[in-house]
Image (cartoon, grey):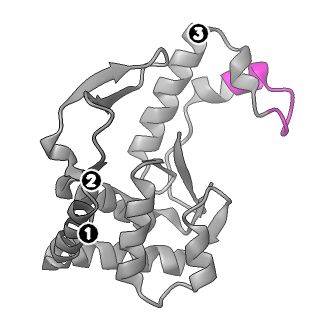
Amino acid sequence: MGYDISGHNPSVTEYPQYCKDLEKKYSTGEDDFFWLDKATDAERSQWHYQDTKWKSENDGVYFRSPVWLWPTTWTFVGHLMNDLIDEKLFDRGYYNDFAGYNEDIAKQISVVIKDAISTGELKHMYKQYASQMKAKGRVNEDDVGYKKVSTSAGYDYEIKTDPKVETYHSFNRLKNHLNAFADFCAASGGFTIG
């Protein structure tokens, strides 16, 4: 589960031939969103590997945010952007409802995030956020034990060893996520959340 954010007009290398061929083999047309389910496990695994590699090599194509990290990320973007995004359009960014943001807004988001990181403004904002979270009884995720889990599809992620502990995001995790989002925004040509 997460937020899928797609670039409108990124500069990209050619999509892997294997992926195109596999879709052609199994897809019955434009409305066939479940064509990959028809592939074998080995084909699906290879498709995921090549598709993920291509996306990671082409900034601006796709950005994936974990569902638990996106609301905080988007809130920080909102504080940094102030009144540069229409309030109703900004509020739609909290949902996977295909809200679209043009190239100018995407570039502005990238610039304000990079500036906030380099000037220390992000660290200052984070201290306020951490203080609010501590007041709610939450613990910094760096102070909680985690264990690595792998899915059958080959994705690795971490889960808390004690699921009852409510945490908030560490500065480094949030900073790195915002920085990656800024890189995506700069290269996206505008983007859609959903």
Q: Is residue 186 left or right of residue 25?
A: left
Dot 3: within a 10 Å radius of its alpha carbon, few (fewer than 14), some, or many (20 or more) residues? few
Residue bearing mark 3: 41
**Left/right of residue 192 with respect to residue 149 in the rendered view:** right
Image depth: mark 1 or mark 2 in front: 1
Residue at 35%, 61% (x, y): give it: 183
Q: Is mark 2 on a helix, strand or loop?
A: loop
Q: Please name the amino acid that badge 3 sits on.
A: Asp
Quarter-wise, where is residue 34 in the image? Answer: top right
The type of residue carrying mark 1 is Gln
The quarter of the picture where the C terminus appears is: bottom right
Foreground residue among 163 and 97: 163
- Helix or strand or loop: what does disc 3 sit on? helix
Name which residue lies at 55% across and 76% down: 90
| Mark closest to the chain's N terminus, 3 or 1 | 3
Please indicate whether residue 72 sits to the left or right of residue 102 in the image: left
Q: Which residue is drawn at 24% across and 78% down?
A: 115
Task: Using the image as rendered, state which of residue 102 and residue 87 is in the foreground.
Answer: 87
**Residue reaching furthest bottom?**
83
Which residues make up the magenta segment? 22-32
**What residue type is disc 2 on?**
His
Displayed quadrant of residue 42: top right
Pointers 3 and 2 in contact (CB under 8 A)? no
Q: Which mark is residue 132?
A: 1
